[in-house]
Image: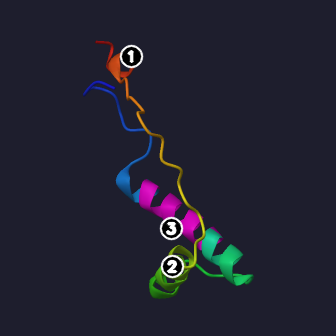
């Protein structure tokens, strides 16, 4: 994107979209309808509980190499 193109979505639109998505997640976690804006502390608490109780373990790949050459047309 060059400097002369307009943004597809401005900052407030992005924040509203993220708020809506987080509200959907909160509704899913609590199995109830939530109104936007919602209690951000409740949402954060649920996320922290999920993190603490997660059993997910990301596998470690030994000797992995990252090649970003094609990503930057170098």
Q: Residue at x 37, y 23 (%)?
A: 67
Q: Where residue 54 sits: x, y (%)?
A: 58, 72
Q: Where residue 71 sits: x, y (%)?
A: 38, 22
Q: Where residue 73 sits: x, y (%)?
A: 33, 13
Image quadrant for the N terminus? top left
- Label 1 or label 2, whichever lies nearer to me, is 2
Closer to us: 40 or 51: 51
Q: Earlier in the sequence, mark 2 or mark 3?
A: 3
- Residue 52's label in the rendered image is 2
User: Where is mark 1, residue-wise?
Assistant: 70
User: Where is mark 3, residue-wise?
Assistant: 19
Q: Which range is magenta?
A: 14-24
Q: Quick one: label 2, few (<14), some, or many (20+) residues within 10 Å? A: few
Q: Earlier in the sequence, mark 3 or mark 1?
A: 3
- Along the horizontal axis of the image, is 3 left or right of 44? left
Residue 16: within the magenta?
Answer: yes
User: In 3D space, how far apart are the residues under numbered discs 3 and 1 (Cα atoms)?
Assistant: 34 Å
Circle 3: element type:
helix
């Amino acid at each position: 994107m060059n400097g002369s193109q307009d943004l597809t979505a401005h900052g407030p639109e992005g924040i509203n979209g993220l708020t809506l998505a987080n509200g959907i997640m909160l509704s899913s976690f609590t199995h109830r309808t939530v109104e936007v804006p919602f209690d951000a502390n409740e949402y954060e608490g649920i996320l922290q509980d999920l993190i603490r109780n997660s059993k997910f373990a990301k596998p470690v790949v030994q000797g992995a190499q990252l090649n970003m050459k094609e990503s930057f047309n170098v």
